Amino acid sequence: MALPVETFFLHPDAQGTLQQQIQQMIAQGILSGRFQQGEKLPSTRKLATHLGVSRITVTIAYTELLANDYLVSKGRSGYFVSENAPSPPSFTATPESQDAVDWTRAIGQKFSGGAGLAKPQDWAKFRFPFIYGQADQTLFDHANWRLCALQALGQKDFTALTTDYYDQDDPQLIEFIARHTLPRRGITARPEQILITLGAQNALWLTTQVLLTQRRSAVLEDPCYPALRDILSQSRCNVTPVRVDQDGLPPDAIPPETHVVFTTPSHQCPTNATMPMERRRALLDRAREMEALIVEDDYEFEMSFLKSPSPALKSLDTDGRVIYVGSFSKSLFPGLRLGYLVGSEPFIREARALRASVLRHAPGHIQRTAAYFLSLGHYDALIRRTGTALHERRRIMEEALAAHDLRISGRGYFGGSSFWMRAPDHVNTVELARRLHAKGVLIEPGHAFFAGTHQPSNYYRLAYSSIPTARIREGVDLIAREIEEMR
Amino acid sequence: MALPVETFFLHPDAQGTLQQQIQQMIAQGILSGRFQQGEKLPSTRKLATHLGVSRITVTIAYTELLANDYLVSKGRSGYFVSENAPSPPSFTATPESQDAVDWTRAIGQKFSGGAGLAKPQDWAKFRFPFIYGQADQTLFDHANWRLCALQALGQKDFTALTTDYYDQDDPQLIEFIARHTLPRRGITARPEQILITLGAQNALWLTTQVLLTQRRSAVLEDPCYPALRDILSQSRCNVTPVRVDQDGLPPDAIPPETHVVFTTPSHQCPTNATMPMERRRALLDRAREMEALIVEDDYEFEMSFLKSPSPALKSLDTDGRVIYVGSFSKSLFPGLRLGYLVGSEPFIREARALRASVLRHAPGHIQRTAAYFLSLGHYDALIRRTGTALHERRRIMEEALAAHDLRISGRGYFGGSSFWMRAPDHVNTVELARRLHAKGVLIEPGHAFFAGTHQPSNYYRLAYSSIPTARIREGVDLIAREIEEMR
């Protein structure tokens, strides 16, 4: 029986080339049982006319389906659904039914309800996205990333793509980090002291599980990265927030009996403060005195375009006391999900065993692509270009903020990609963000960065990593006007 | 100053094309400070002669480095290290020092020392790899995977590649799983009931964290997947192993007061038993009676080449009592690290929040590539081709095993990719594996699959998913001979 051409439709929202859409439509028709084994397909000419595409497009789609044995060609008689084509399931799906499980009882531990990470997924559609930590399509070196990915997809790298590394990582990526990336932060590490993680988030999570229990105490900077507070609260350890000043975390304020100190010395998150060398030494001394460990989140050191970055805190550590967290999410893109941990071997061994149990390892293809991108020098070139662009955006932003007398609470003297802003006391920045959202302006309210229940409500973060340079002035104008109206 | 051509060497172990090796050598020379700003490079002709490569290769490498601003070209004077090239770090790395931390005390929770997942990373170098769950280069559709990856790297998919999904997943992959994959297992699910995980390992781990605590009880099949036992022992819940029979897990043997039952009804791991429909219904009844939940690991249903697969246990579940774990590791490749969880919304909500905290989400590029590979029909075509090849290998394997009177303890009547073998009682299969390893034969000793301390030591697993068809007979001969010698 011939399938009537009228039953063939391209879905208006379909993705991919026309050829792929046709291929997909037919494969899915067969998989769902709508087109059955032995049935005849419309001729390429007929289908092409019906769909309004060129005949060669249909011919290529049919040829692909022949290769995959969805179709067979019987000379002049045309194309048929192959006898070897996959058959649809012989049973029908159970209709959805009412849950009989009491989930309140069944769930042993609740994880939802944290400060959350929610930012608009559709930020790129906004005219004025002063949004933090997302990839800017105009700055990212997409062409070379593609080439590196393509190389990592080659026959030679088949093992790197497909292999089960169990608790191990791509040796090429580890070697590059050990030999090239870490020395630039003043850090020496052997491969056994490095673990690849699913982004910095995963590195911080693994570290927390290995080092902290209900009976141990951690110090967090206040304000700090909200997701870190969620991780620690899930671990149920005792958490003390310590208010940062213009130089970051003050070592004297760390209470005795602290086991682990989490800090962001290069760029304090979110205030952008850089910890001076003297304080770094004092922090290490204080930790030694208390026999505490320090977790250094070095999430944005590459964005030091105003002055060269200071060496990492880890590079001053002669005790093995500092655990270093690196990330490619800010410098490449967050969807990559690649970061790394550097620490003493006994620590890395436990973090490695835990990671193996939780997820085994980061996908091999992603690791190998990053290894190529780094080793061919594209990474450093990208950082440099990004720094130049951010430098310019920052200059324009500072001018615009000054023109409106908007108060910068933390600017970061080494660079970075955001300003930590303070609105007048009466301005609730959640409300400010809501109003600006309606006008196409995205800002990040600051309350979630603070610990406790009496969080200041008048801070906000303004990032310049994703906003087009030409729109900065107009965007800042809108923010200033909205604050004015909230008097 | 001109850099002497003699200082340029290609590393004998270097990877990639010659052009990339040259590019890499120069970029790394600059990044490490060996080549300094303003220094003159050898002419393309001179470097080409010195390295023994064609001049055009050197010219292309130089051109790439110009584009990245590592080099500048000054007309006829030649190429120089650019003034804008990245500068090396201005501080030297701290030499490695003695650890002053007492790690035994500092580590709050130990994760190492589990049954582990260790298999030889270099299995592909063995002549007779009867190894389980690795990608066979001769069967995998590498060409179409590459094409799908390439499409997912295009401009149109820039967002899918780079975006921070926070706690969300690629909507295209979720939609395909909901509309096409799950219906083939008889399962209906809405997108909110599906969560993408880093492989089945990650799905089982997340499920355990959400459902089990120190005060709750789980049932595990005995024997079972050893990494699952590690996950449960880390969660410190109460675990009861229940011995499986030729039909899988016997529902009557499940003790009352069980909160969660872990089972592999399609292909019991490692015995390959398929649970009959009647027992599936009895298992659901038993769970309902006890108000217990069931976690169904459906890790290998695609490999049903002897009979069509039975519908998943989840498809019989009208209570929302079954949590379904799916995986692409066996059907595509383990290095992909993609799996998924299907369950009631309140459960998925908690698993989603936990996943966000632990790692956010699987890399976007991997998700989108899989979505294309699935939706273009390549996945089903691959499964079909693989099934045909495994069917043939299995036939030869059964003949060879029968010829030597080697005892199959579990063969799997639907297909699968391995036999569960039983050696004579006096044969310790760890020792057997060690002896065979020296002869190029890889087998998997069975003891780690069993619970408790008195594990039977004479079982082993023989997989045929990665061994070339032509080597099966010789490999089985070697196994039989070795067992004979161990009398």
Image (tube, coloured by chain):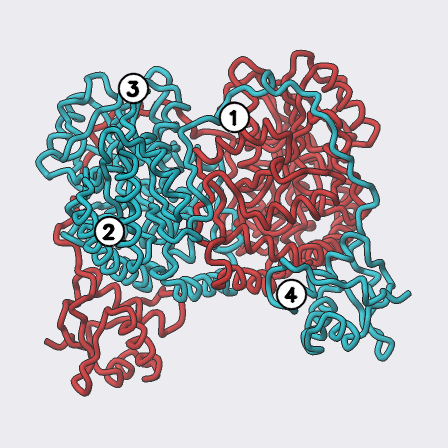
Chain colours: A cyan, B red
The answer to whether residue B78 is above or below residue B85 is below
Residue at the spot x=19%, y=85% of the render? B75
Labelled disc at residue B87: none
Q: Position of residue B199 (x, y in %)?
A: 56, 42
Neighbor class of circle 3 (other Cα within 10 Å; few <14, some 14-19, many 20+) is: many
Residue at the spot x=72%, y=24% of the render? B319
Q: Secondary structure at mark 4?
A: helix
Q: Earlier in the sequence, mark 3 or mark 4?
A: 4
Amino acid type, label 3:
Ser
* C-alpha span from label 2 to label 4: 41 Å
Amino acid type, label 1:
Gln
Neighbor class of circle 1 (other Cα within 10 Å; few <14, some 14-19, many 20+) is: many
Q: Which residue is mark 4?
A: A20
* C-alpha span from label 2 to label 3: 32 Å
Labelled disc at residue B209: 1
Q: Is residue A360 left or right of residue B52?
A: right
Q: Earlier in the sequence, mark 2 or mark 4?
A: 4
* C-alpha span from label 1 to label 4: 41 Å
Neighbor class of circle 2 (other Cα within 10 Å; few <14, some 14-19, many 20+) is: many
Q: Which residue is mark 3?
A: A217
Amino acid type, label 2:
Met
The answer to whether residue B419 is above or below residue B382 is above
Q: Which residue is mark 2?
A: A303
**Front-most of A139 and A151?**
A139
Q: Is residue B136 left or right of residue B392?
A: left
